Image: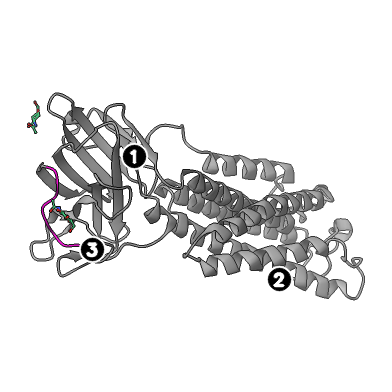
Amino acid sequence: MASPSPRALVIVLVLSLLAFSAPAANSLACTTQKLTDSGIYSTCLDLPALGSTLHYSYNAANSSAAVAFITSLPESRGWVSWALNPTGTGMVGCQALIAFKDASTGAMAVKTYNVSSYGSVEESKISFEVWDMAAESATDGTMRIYAKIKVPGDASKLNQVWQVGPSVTDGVPDKHDFAVANLVAKGTLNLVSGQTSSTSGDSGLQKKNIHGILNVVSWGILFPFGIIIARYLRVFPSADPTWFYLHVFCQFSAYVIGSAGWGSGLSLGGKSEGIIYSSHRNLGIAIFCMSTIQMFALLVRPKKDHKYRFYWNIYHHGFGYSIIIIGIVNVFKGYDILRPAEKWKSRYITTIAALVGFALLLEVVTWMVVLKRGSYKSTRPSYDGSCDGQSRQDSLAL
Ligand SMILES: *[C@@H]1O[C@H](CO)[C@@H](O)[C@H](O)[C@H]1NC(C)=O
Ligand SMILES: *[C@@H]1O[C@H](CO)[C@@H](O)[C@H](O)[C@H]1NC(C)=O
């Protein structure tokens, strides 16, 4: 078998990464949703949290509106809710429609709630007229609430609140989670112009998104990618010493971007009152410390034939692989806290799966190259001081 050129491998890797992580065209997710009765809704909006959307049409003549609220639910035995709050911006005062599966009939039911405190909620009449209420658990995994309402007050300035909860006990919706996405799931709704905005923490949410992007790109993608370069490219003599500089470049960029992400995380943590995501925070600190030590690894790297090089390799590789694992775990913890639209998490999963797939492929290819050259002297993985290629031809171990 002809050995594939390392340059081609890098190009394939980079292209596929771009393909997987490039954001889709900037269209509203809600426009692709299929509704049973789609004809009656003239407008749709992507709500800024919990991956939810609102379809509606407003009839100014008698100030009534038809609304369809769509969201995905973490647990099928949970509840979903859409509410207007005529008296405030938060949960208290909400006139809510809450839908969940009725335990006795197994069918989806939607009920109204006058939420007067942060305690448990009780079914009750609400302050505006509602009719044609229906709920549906759609085949695409979303839950939907349909209703027609007599709009209370100024239709261009409504306070809406939406929410999802994990469970229902004896017909009463249990508390929802207190992740960032749950807490920011509210905003003003303008039924006349068709706009929505977040009332609280809009800029806070933006900071959290930036924090997320920096850390996903650095620890979650670049860092593992740099390790793949180091592990596989150096099998090819022609890639020496290019792989080394690519590896250093990748890890150093990951470190710089990751440090910015880490700093933004500390600042968010400092501003977050009452809610502390301690394991996310502690893992973040561990990653930052370990990667800082990794950066110094470059400075204290013993020469290839130095007797301590063996130990240096063990430490450098051990730290490197630990950072990948902790980094990816922490990225997923971050997704659970921020709960961006589901597609971001699935794109990340696809990217990681692609990286793993390439790593496995390269594992096979490099093994074939090594075996073909007939160098069985050392078996992989070994710590034979292979960090600067010169002796690659003799010792191909990684
Ligand atoms: C408002 O008008 C629409 C369409 O003409 C009608 O379906 C709806 O029932 C009316 N709403 C109220 C509150 O009268
Ligand atoms: C909702 O609850 C509040 C506080 O208990 C009460 O003042 C209000 O009248 C209730 N609204 C309706 C429509 O029952």
- Image coords of residue 221 (percent x, y): 61, 52
Q: Which mark is residue 188?
A: 1
Instruction: Say which amino acid is labelled 3.
Output: Arg
Spatial separation of the CA atoms under disc 2 and disc 3: 42 Å
The circle drawn on residue 77 is 3
Q: Nearer the viewer, residue 321 or 114?
A: 114
Residue 390 image offset from top left, x and y in percent = 89, 57
What residue is pinned by disc 2? 318
Q: Is residue 368 above or below residue 198?
A: below
Distance in Å between CA atoms under marks 1 and 2? 50 Å
- Residue lying furthest top in this view? 61
Q: Is 328 on the left-hand or right-hand side of 32?
A: right
Q: Cβ(mark 1) to ligand 2 < 8 Å? A: no
In the image, residue 124 lies in the stretch drawn in magenta? yes
Report crowding for label 3: few under 14, some 14 to 19, many 20 or more residues within 10 A (C-alpha).
some
| Magenta span | 120-128
Name the dominant secondary structure of the magenta segment. loop
Find out if the beta carbon at label 2 lies less than 8 Å from the nearest ligand 2 atom. Answer: no
Q: Nearer the viewer, residue 242 or 42?
A: 42
